[in-house]
């Protein structure tokens, strides 16, 4: 029996991966750099959302096993990732 949190995380990643593949096919179909860049920019909004959602699901699944200190370190790490992604 699969853990419901693991199943949710994997499903979200499958959906995200499918969107990535669909975007790549759309880029090939459009065959124009400017339009492909627009498609790629749309994916830039989805990526951080998927990361945050998947991490949140995992943390909820582990909440009973993590101490407050460890949970705080995980949140600091995720914050550093987002700062690195969003900082220009």
Image (spheres, rainbow, N blue to C red):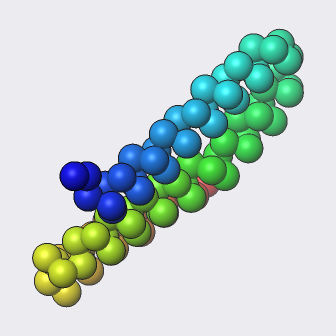
In-front residue for pair 80/78: 78
Along the viewing direction, whichever of 34 and 11 lies nearer the viewer? 11
- Residue 30 appears left or right of 62: right
Specify the farthest residue to the front.
1
Asked whether residue 41 is in view, the answer is yes
Q: Nearer the viewer, residue 5 or 53?
A: 5
Q: Quadrant of residue 77?
A: bottom left
Which quadrant of the structure image shows residue 59?
Answer: bottom left
Q: Residue at x 53, y 35 (%)?
A: 17
User: Left of 49 or right of it: where is 25?
Assistant: right
Query: Where residue 27 appears, x then y in whole percent?
Result: 76, 21
Number of numbered discs: 0
Q: Quadrant of residue 18?
A: top right
Can you say whether 87 is above or below 61 in the image? above
Q: Residue 36: horizontal and vertical position, in percent?
A: 78, 26
Place of residue 28 in the rendered image (x, y in percent of width and height, measured from the top left):
75, 14
- Answer left or right for 44 relative to 80: right
Q: Could you say where residue 14 lies in the image, as x and y percent from the top left?
A: 48, 39
Residue at the (14%, 76%) spot, across then down: 65
- Residue drawn at the location 22% of the way across and 52% of the way down: 1
Q: Residue at x 24, y 78 (%)?
A: 63
């Amino acid at each position: 029996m699969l853990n419901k949190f693991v199943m949710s995380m994997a499903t979200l990643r499958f959906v995200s991966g499918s969107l990535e593949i669909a975007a790549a096919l759309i880029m090939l179909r459009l065959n124009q750099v400017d339009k492909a860049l627009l498609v790629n920019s749309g994916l830039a909004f989805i990526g951080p959302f998927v990361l945050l959602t998947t991490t949140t699901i995992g943390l909820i699944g582990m909440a009973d096993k993590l101490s407050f200190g460890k949970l705080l370190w995980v949140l600091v790490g995720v914050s550093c990732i987002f700062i690195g992604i969003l900082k220009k």
